[in-house]
Amino acid sequence: MAITVTVPHKIGLSASTPTYNNVFNVVLDASYPTGGELLGLQARIGAGKTIASVICQGIVTSSGDPDLRGYQYNYTTDKIMGVLADGTAEVANTEDLSTVTVKVIVTSY
């Protein structure tokens, strides 16, 4: 099963601004793969832009409450990774994260 990515709104996406902010809602799937889910951020923000920072916030889809696990973007592998609440390890392989939406905020130039 694959992740689903939607674009709830675009901020600062005009030729006159020196930086761009893209917001993506990423709904994870029912079988988390070790190493994370491939996100494809460069293609999503557009060719020729450089990713400056990525902020990830997990939200329980049904309630809107923060998810207790952490989420981070791996710049090298272009994957979004889930980590345990204490930050000590990656979430387990095949863990069901389908009830989580991760808001991903990308700043680029």
Image (tube, rainbow, N blue to C red):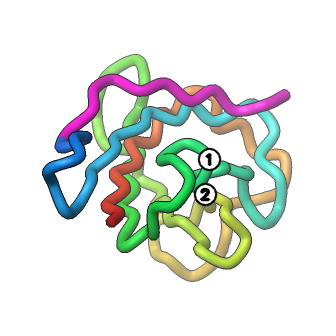
The reply to whether the magenta stretch includes residue 5 is yes
Amino acid found under the numbered disc labelled 1? Ala
Q: Is residue 94 left or right of residue 69?
A: right
Relative to 15, does residue 63 appear above or below in the rendering?
above
Relative to 29, does residue 75 appear above or below in the rendering?
below
Amino acid found under the numbered disc labelled 2? Ile
Magenta part of the protein: which range? 1-11
Q: Where is residue 76 in the image (x, y as percent from the top left)?
A: 68, 78
The residue lying furthest to the top in this view is 62
1 vs 2, front mark: 1
Task: Identify the mark at residue 43; answer none if there is no mark.
Answer: 1
Q: What element carries label 1?
A: helix
**Can you tell which quarter of the image residue 17 is in?**
bottom left
Q: Name the residue that disc number 2 marks.
A: 80
Q: Which of 27 and 61 is in front in this view?
A: 27
Q: Position of residue 96 (x, y in %)?
A: 72, 36
Marks 1 and 2, the one that precedes in the sequence: 1
Quarter occupied by the N terminus: top right
